[in-house]
């Protein structure tokens, strides 16, 4: 009789006694055994255990309860939070509940695995080529309770859509009983299609609810306070809802802002600090942005050719998992390199980490925004919309490593044509057939398919 898979279905059961931990640190010739100790609950969904010396390489090592030297109850494995933990003296396991048993049965019986919640309802790659911008935050009333991240998408026809997070690296779409569902915040319109250049989200008004910030083409900057599933955004220039706050007027210097990244960059506990990339490459930071405007400007970079010509996307997230609430700045460069500037508030742009070296694939990332989509309470899950319309989330990413890939929308089928006609009213028309190459369009799924064919 071997070790027995054992579930701990209730959060109160995560505090366990008489637990041994076994793992193989990298380069070790024999296993490292941490004898009988205790586990405790961490963030309501992880087992935490204090054992010294569990260096990289121990991932997958079992948490064995009542281990007698021959067998025990497997109540966890090293992994989960921060891929098992950031330090050698503390390790973690995701909670073993009924989902683990279902996964085990699928594996041993060769059943089809579960699919992410949203994969059936998020549409296809042809649709998602029209997702032009996105912002994340806790918008839906259900997400404010669970602290899960939602997604707001601005489409090429001006439609604005809210997708509630499902706490499992995906999003709810179809309106199933008892679940939140996709909500239209603005119907297709020319105002958003032609003039909403940049969107970002944070809690600028200090009400414990997320607001949407829009930088318009004429230089106006607008905050829409406390956005949720009941919000109706304006669809014409003469519409001004009660939750609209203008913090920069038309014709202001903000028409030269090319990128906005919101986060906790050293102001206060709210995600209300904004980093700006300007058309000339200058980088500035504003702390404690609120309904009265932008404050405490700090120059991070003087105007320069590098940030002007090659910093394609900027976004705020928390990839290094620090407890001081200081966010990191993520930059996608024109050559596909991904860079993380850790703890921007404390270090400015001086502490640079390379998440991905220059590469062809990431030059095809078109929409890129970090959020908290499941697994822990950090904004370290990376939502990506690729040029071929594939949509992926990299869960629990770190400053130097992408996390597990979750495919929410698969790439277009081999040899398929990109069609713009969609039931939701997206732009009509037809484009040329997608070639099986990564020259014009690509995503990780298409790249793997091409590589396999070779």
Image (cartoon, grey):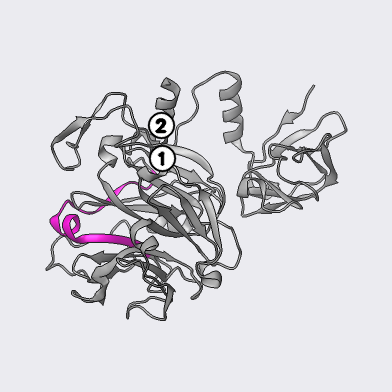
Label 2: state its secondary structure: helix
How many numbered marks are there?
2
Q: Is residue 147 left or right of residue 365?
A: right
Residue 292 image-quadrant placement = bottom left
**Going 30% across and 35% down the picture, which residue do you hit?**
125
Tell me the residue at 45%/23% (across/down): 452
Q: Magenta part of the protein: which range?
A: 178-201
Judge whether residue 179 can be spotted in this image: no
Residue 2 % position (x, y) = 78, 24
Q: Residue at x 76, y 41 (%)?
A: 25
Q: Answer above or below: position of 21 versus 192.
A: above
- Which is more toward the observer, 250 or 233? 250
418 and 230: which is toward the camera: 418
Give residue 361's mark.
Answer: 1
Q: Which residue is mark 2?
A: 447
Residue 76 position, x and y percent, is: 69, 39
Measured in 3D between alpha carbons, the distance from the residue under mark 1 to the one under mark 2, in whole angstroms, is 8 Å
């Amino acid at each position: 009789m071997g070790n027995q898979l054992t579930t701990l279905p209730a959060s109160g059961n995560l505090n366990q006694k008489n637990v041994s931990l076994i793992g193989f640190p990298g380069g070790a010739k024999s296993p490292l055994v941490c004898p009988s100790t205790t586990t405790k609950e961490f963030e309501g969904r992880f087992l935490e255990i204090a054992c010294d010396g569990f260096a990289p390489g121990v991932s997958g090592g079992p948490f064995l309860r009542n281990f007698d030297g021959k067998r025990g109850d497997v109540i966890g494995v090293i992994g989960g939070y921060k891929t098992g933990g950031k330090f050698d003296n503390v390790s973690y396991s995701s909670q073993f509940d009924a989902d683990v048993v279902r996964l085990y049965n699928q594996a041993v019986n060769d059943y089809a695995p579960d699919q992410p919640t949203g994969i059936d309802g998020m549409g296809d790659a042809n649709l998602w080529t029209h997702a032009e911008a996105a912002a994340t935050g806790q918008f839906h009333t259900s997400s404010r309770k669970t602290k899960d991240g939602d997604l707001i998408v601005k489409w090429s026809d001006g439609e604005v859509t809210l997708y509630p997070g499902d706490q499992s690296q995906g999003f709810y779409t179809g309106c199933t009983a008892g679940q939140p569902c996709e909500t239209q915040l603005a119907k297709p319109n020319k105002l958003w299609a032609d003039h909403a250049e940049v969107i970002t989200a944070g809690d600028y008004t200090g009400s414990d609810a997320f607001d949407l910030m829009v930088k318009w083409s004429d230089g106006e900057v607008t905050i829409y306070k406390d956005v949720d599933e009941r919000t109706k955004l304006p669809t014409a220039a003469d519409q001004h809802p009660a939750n609209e706050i203008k913090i920069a007027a038309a014709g202001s210097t903000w028409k030269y802002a090319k990128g906005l990244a919101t986060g906790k960059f050293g102001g206060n506990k709210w995600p209300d600090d904004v980093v700006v990339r300007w058309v000339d490459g200058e980088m500035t930071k504003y702390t404690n942005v609120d309904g009265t405007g932008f404050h405490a400007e700090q120059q991070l970079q003087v105007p320069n050719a590098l940030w002007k010509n090659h910093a394609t996307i900027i976004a705020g997230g928390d990839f290094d998992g620090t407890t001081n609430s200081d966010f990191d700045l993520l930059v996608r460069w024109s050559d596909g390199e991904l860079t993380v500037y850790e703890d921007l508030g404390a270090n400015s742009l001086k502490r640079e980490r390379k998440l991905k070296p220059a590469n062809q694939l990431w030059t095809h990332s078109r929409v890129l925004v970090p959020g908290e989509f499941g697994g822990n309470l950090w904004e370290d899950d990376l939502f990506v919309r690729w040029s071929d319309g594939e949509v992926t989330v990299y869960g629990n990413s770190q400053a130097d490593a992408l996390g597990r890939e979750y495919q929410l929308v698969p790439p277009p089928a081999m040899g398929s044509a990109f069609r713009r006609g969609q039931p939701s009213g997206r732009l009509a028309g037809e484009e040329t057939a997608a070639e099986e190459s990564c020259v014009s369009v690509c995503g990780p799924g298409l790249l793997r398919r091409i590589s396999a064919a070779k």
